[in-house]
Amino acid sequence: QVHLVESGGGLVQAGASLRLSCVASGTTFNKYVMGWFRQAPGKEREFVAAITWKGDITDSRDSATGRFTISRDNDKNTVYLQMDTLKPEDTALYYCAVTMSLFGTDMLQGTVDAWGQGTLVTVSS
C-alpha cells in the first residue's frame, strides 16, 4: 500500500521561503509521477506541479509559476516543493500525490493514485 508523508509546512511572513518534502513508501516510485496539490480555505483542491521519474516537469501556469520549484530524489523516494517569495494567497493545505504513470499531464488532468495527509502552509502579510 502506498504511503506518503509530507513535512516542511509552517507559518511564515510574506516574502519568505519554505521547502516541502514528501517521502513515499510502499512501492517502487522511480517510474511514477510525483507532485503537489494545494487547497486554500473555502476553495477546491488545485494542481500545483508534477515531476516524472526522468525529471520532466508539469506546472499549473498560475501565480505560483516562477516562484515554486518541484524536484525529486528517486533514490530517496522523495519529492520536494521549494516555495520562494511566498504570498498570503499561497496559504493552503499542501498535499503530496502520486500518479502511476510516466506523464505529468495525467496528474494535471486529475488522475491521482495516492494522497498524503497534507501539510499546512500559512503566509501572513
Image (cartoon, grey):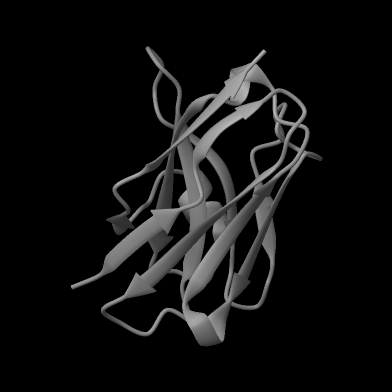
Q: Position of residue 46 (x, y in %)?
A: 48, 32
- Residue extending furthest toward the right: 66
Q: Is residue 47 left or right of residue 60?
A: left
In the rendered image, is residue 103 in sight?
no
Q: Position of residue 28 (x, y in %)?
A: 37, 85
The front one of 96 and 110 is 96
Name the residue at 71% across, 41% down. Answer: 17
Query: Is 8 rendered above or below residue 100?
Result: above
Residue 125 appears in which quarter of the rendering?
top right
Query: Is 29 rendered above or below residue 93?
Result: below
Query: Is 36 rendered above or below residue 10?
Result: below
In the rendered image, is residue 21 in sight?
yes
Q: Is residue 119 left or right of residue 113?
A: right
Residue 70 appears in which quarter of the rendering?
bottom right
Name the residue at 35% across, 60% down. Answer: 5
Name the residue at 56% across, 59% down. Answer: 104
Name the residue at 51% across, 55% down. Answer: 35
Q: Position of residue 99 (x, y in %)?
A: 40, 62
